[in-house]
Amino acid sequence: MRKQHVMSPVGSVKRGGGLLLLLTMALSGCATMTPPPAVRSSDNASSAYDNRAETTVLDAVLVHTIAEIGKPYQWGGDNPRTGFDCSGFIQYVLRRAGVNIPRTSFAQAAALPSVNPRRIRPGDLVFFNTMGQPFSHVGIYIGGDQFVSALNPRQGVAVQSLRIPYWAERLDGVRRPMPPELLAMGAP
């Protein structure tokens, strides 16, 4: 019968002392490891919370927006049974997502933080000058240069493209729905 040897990085080791050698090598390797990353500052932690809370609201806005496509239009309307006008639609969807805002499109634009149109995200609000007045129409951006709004009695709540010249020429600005705690802090 042949004698068996255990192979290790340092050669053949007989049973017994080899285990101690391997354990020593492994533990000494721990001493040369780089230190763990520094603990995040409260600013970074707060910023991470802000981003998560903002994303959660935008996702909720998007889900509730999609659910209302095809609902009827009603001037002054603010519920899915009887219909929506543009600002009633926005107020309804944002309330379901946990954000309370005023009723009119102009007041909604004033209540929410502005976003550079190049940084638009699905769930953001898009405002238009459709009546010769700033912020006279509002919709919810859903991505792919498209938005949803309560348009008129013929179309109801429908998807439109920001690439259509009518909308592109009248875009007034973008606003971001924010969770109440971030709005209270004045977060951008």
Image: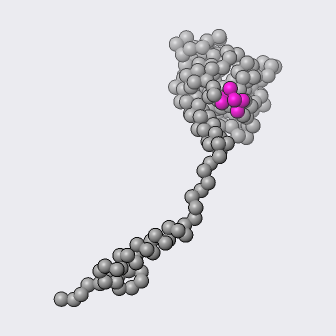
Q: Quadrant of residue 172?
A: top right
* Residue 91 visible: yes
Q: Quadrant of the N terminus?
A: bottom left
In the rendered structure, the answer to whether residue 117 lies left or right of residue 64 reads: right
Q: Residue lying farthest bottom? A: 2
Relative to the observer, which residue lies in front, 16 or 43? 16
The residue under the point 24% across, 87% down is: 3
Q: Quadrant of residue 126?
A: top right
Q: Is residue 59 above or below residue 6?
A: above
Residue 89 rendering spot, x and y as whole percentages: 61, 19
Relative to the observer, which residue lies in front, 149 or 30? 30
In the rendered structure, the answer to whether residue 157 lies left or right of residue 8 reads: right
The residue under the point 55% across, 11% down is: 82
In the rendered structure, the answer to whether residue 81 lies left or right of residue 108 reads: left
Q: Is residue 52 above or below residue 150?
A: below
Q: Is residue 43 magenta?
A: no
Q: Is residue 8 above or below residue 157?
A: below
Residue 167 rendering spot, x and y as whole percentages: 73, 29
* Residue 140 visible: no
Residue 40 rendering spot, x and y as whole percentages: 62, 48
Relative to the observer, which residue lies in front, 16 or 44? 16
Q: Which residues are magenta?
A: 182-187
Residue 186 rendering spot, x and y as whole percentages: 72, 29
The residue under the point 73% across, 18% down is: 107
Q: Quadrant of residue 133?
A: top right
Say how many tags the image has. 0
Task: Decide whether the magenta segment is chiefly helix, strand or loop.
Answer: helix
Q: Is residue 185 magenta?
A: yes
